[in-house]
């Protein structure tokens, strides 16, 4: 249903993204990413590493690192997918927000809310350094 391929949207070292291998209907489950969670008071240590850009809020007092393909979805302010946290199963469940064509890159809004257009933390960092 999904695969990792080179993405033109990513400017990281590996330029990866998650792509649909077949047509996917709105609302369909795309991926269940298990998490490793940790208390927020440990996040300053993670902030000193590359993993800081991949951490997700996980409830009130925790942060999570996603496993599986969870950390490889790229960002868009016009996403075609969304995610829900399943605390019971300790997963982030990714769902098609719209119909997705085979071969299309699957994109989420890193702000969590599909309608949130606030600048992302890494864009703020670039802006602050100029």
Image: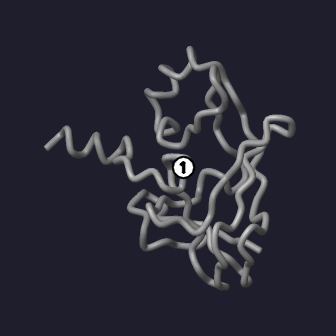
Position of the C terminus by quadrant: top left
The residue under the point 78% across, 54% down is 32
Q: Is residue 84 left or right of residue 17?
A: right
Camera-nearest residue between 40 and 116 = 116
Q: Residue furthest top?
A: 41
Camera-nearest residue between 113 and 90 = 113
Above or below, 120 relative to 28: above
Above or below, 51 relative to 78: above
Residue 81 x, y percent position in the rendering = 62, 64
Position of the N terminus by quadrant: bottom right
Residue 62 x, y percent position in the rendering = 64, 24
Q: Residue furthest left?
A: 130
The residue under the point 70% across, 29% down is 37
Above or below, 116 relative to 26: above
**Mark 1 surroundings within 10 Å by alpha-carbon count, few (fewer than 14), some (14 through 19), many (20 or more):** few
Camera-nearest residue between 36 and 104 = 104
The residue under the point 43% across, 27% down is 48
Q: Secondary structure at mark 1?
A: loop
The residue under the point 63% across, 73% down is 98
Q: Residue furthest right?
A: 89
> Which residue is disc 1 drawn over?
113
């Amino acid at each position: 249903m999904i695969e990792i391929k080179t993405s033109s949207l990513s400017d990281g070292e590996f330029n990866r993204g998650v792509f649909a291998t077949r047509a996917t209907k709105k609302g369909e489950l795309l991926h269940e990413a298990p998490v490793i969670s940790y208390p927020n008071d440990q996040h300053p240590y993670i902030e000193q590493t590359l993993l800081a850009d991949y951490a997700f809020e996980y409830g009130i007092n925790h942060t999570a690192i996603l496993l599986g393909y969870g950390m490889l979805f790229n960002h868009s302010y016009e996403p075609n997918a969304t995610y829900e946290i399943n605390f019971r199963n300790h997963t982030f469940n990714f769902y098609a927000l719209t119909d997705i064509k085979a071969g299309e890159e699957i994109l989420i809004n890193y702000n969590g809310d599909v309608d949130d257009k606030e600048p992302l933390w890494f864009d703020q960092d670039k802006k602050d350094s100029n």
